[in-house]
């Protein structure tokens, strides 16, 4: 597995419900901006950006290999399995490169592995209640994968942070009167919902949940922050389930001792619940298989390692690549950043913002520039200003 250049890419053929390229190009550009300078410092190589716009064929031409138009259902199939003629194009494009990819498709990882091309797959880590977003990382190179584990955080850190969050909410919420279960819903299009090349339907989810939920157990339905589960809610109500929808932070419920069980299809929330003392029933399977520093990892290199903001450090890339390519010497570094640097750049404040930002601010009656209340107030002022003009 040798390489002499670096390419930063991702799931470039993923489409949204309209058949357009969706948000993957933005995610790849984000990753490129974040990592190109640290990688340059560590290796002297300029990382090339590869989105669908830079690829040698168009979205329509990619899906033509699958004899389909660009649709979500076609993407689900292509994510799992890629025609050889199409994989040959990707291999030609990525030959002799270190591929650093954001949410790489399984089919592309398989093709790179067979062609002996080194890749590092990155994505948002499922444990999202830390002071900053963690990054999941894994590689098909044994030396790089081992180095990634050596740079991972410890699982102990997650338990400590969960304890802090529980303590925060215990002082600020009133427990419910009776035991209840919680279901953590997800967006309808997610790679963790792919099964046999198809996305799991809301009917499948409702049927599986009804099969496992104890009869008469009250259920709180936690919608995904960006997509409500209206169909699932209707199906559960029609089946006679005592179900209510909840807003706000899911960590408030994780801190409630009256909550007896957690259900989900494959949501990251199901993995997070463990650190608050709960056991999750996954109706399908966890979205990630994760491992932390000091823990043994599998020989198949399928587990994701748990990396913090050191991912933006040149020394991080020197350490994980030193056995694979010539790197510059380790150097003293001072990376001063806000505690939630990656979370802020990603704009992923789901659930977490309530803990130490909006919740605290609103409880105190104060309004600070970073609160939701402040943003709404500013927006209304601008509307009034335009109206007056």
Image (cartoon, rainbow, N blue to C red):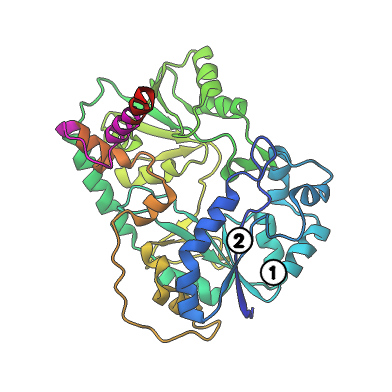
Q: Position of residue 371 (x, y in %)?
A: 28, 38
Q: Position of residue 57 (x, y in %)?
A: 77, 57
Q: Is residue 42 magenta?
A: no
Where are the magenta residues, as a range?
363-381
**Depth check: 258 or 254 in front?**
254
User: Would you say the residues marked 1 and 2 are in contact, meaning their CB atoms lie under 8 Å apart?
Assistant: yes
Q: Which mark is residue 9?
A: 2
Seen in the image, is 295 located left or right of residue 120?
Answer: left
Helix, strand or loop: magenta stretch:
helix
How many neighbours does mark 2 have within 10 angstroms: few (below 14), some (14-19), or many (20 or more)? Answer: many
Q: Position of residue 151 (x, y in %)?
A: 39, 70
Q: Position of residue 134 (x, y in %)?
A: 40, 56
Q: Measuring 49% from the left and 62% from the top, which residue is drawn there?
A: 33
Residue 274 figure quarter: top left
Asked if residue 180 is positioned above or below residue 164 in the image, the reply reads above
**Depth check: 19 or 68 in front?**
19
Marks 1/2: CA distance? Answer: 10 Å
**Depth check: 284 or 188 in front?**
188
> On the rendered image, what quadrant is the N terminus found in?
bottom right
Residue 49 figure quarter: bottom right
Mark before the other along the chain sequence, 1 or 2: 2
Seen in the image, is 219 located left or right of residue 52?
Answer: left
> On the rendered image, what quadrant is the C terminus found in?
top left
How many neighbours does mark 1 have within 10 angstroms: few (below 14), some (14-19), or many (20 or more)? Answer: many
Q: Measuring 50% from the left and 31% from the top, which residue is drawn there?
A: 227
**SS for callout 2:** strand
**Depth check: 113 or 230 in front?**
230
**SS for callout 1:** helix
Asked if residue 195 is positioned above or below residue 320 in the image, the reply reads above
Residue 280 figure quarter: top left
According to the picture, the residue beneath numbered tag 1 turns out to be: 94
């Amino acid at each position: 597995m040798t390489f002499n250049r670096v390419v930063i890419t991702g799931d470039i053929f993923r489409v949204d419900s309209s058949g357009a390229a969706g948000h993957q190009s933005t995610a790849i550009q984000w990753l490129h901006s974040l990592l190109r300078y640290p990688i340059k410092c560590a290796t002297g190589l300029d990382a090339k950006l590869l989105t669908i716009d830079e690829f040698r064929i168009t979205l329509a031409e990619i899906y033509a290999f699958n004899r389909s138009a660009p649709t979500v259902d076609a993407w689900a199939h292509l994510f799992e399995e890629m025609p050889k003629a199409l994989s040959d194009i990707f291999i030609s494009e990525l030959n002799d490169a270190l591929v650093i990819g954001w949410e790489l498709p399984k089919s592309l990882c398989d093709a790179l592995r067979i062609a002996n091309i080194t890749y590092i797959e990155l994505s948002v880590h499922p444990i999202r209640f830390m002071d900053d977003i963690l990054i999941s990382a894994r590689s098909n190179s044994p030396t790089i994968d081992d180095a990634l584990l050596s740079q991972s955080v410890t699982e102990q850190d997650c338990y400590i942070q969960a304890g802090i969050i529980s303590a925060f909410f215990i002082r600020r919420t009133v427990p419910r009167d009776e035991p209840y279960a919680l279901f953590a819903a997800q967006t309808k299009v997610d790679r963790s919902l792919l099964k046999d090349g198809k996305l799991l339907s809301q009917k499948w989810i409702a049927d599986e949940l009804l099969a496992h939920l104890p009869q008469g157990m009250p259920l709180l339905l936690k919608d995904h922050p960006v997509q409500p589960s209206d169909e699932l809610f209707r199906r559960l109500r029609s089946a006679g389930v005592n179900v209510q929808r909840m807003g706000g932070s899911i960590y408030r419920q994780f801190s409630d001792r009256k909550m007896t069980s957690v259900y989900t299809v494959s949501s990251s929330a199901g993995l997070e619940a463990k650190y608050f003392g709960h056991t999750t029933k996954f109706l399908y399977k966890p979205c990630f298989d994760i491992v932390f520093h000091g823990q043994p990892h599998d020989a198949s290199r399928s587990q994701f390692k748990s990396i913090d903001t050191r991912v933006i450090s040149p020394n991080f890339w020197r350490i994980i690549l030193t056995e694979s390519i010539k790197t510059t010497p380790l150097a003293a570094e001072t990376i001063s950043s806000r505690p939630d640097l990656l979370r802020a750049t990603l704009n992923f404040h789901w659930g977490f913002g309530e803990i130490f930002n909006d919740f605290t601010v609103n409880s105190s009656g104060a309004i600070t520039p970073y609160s939701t209340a402040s943003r709404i107030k500013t927006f209304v002022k601008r509307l009034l200003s335009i109206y007056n003009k």
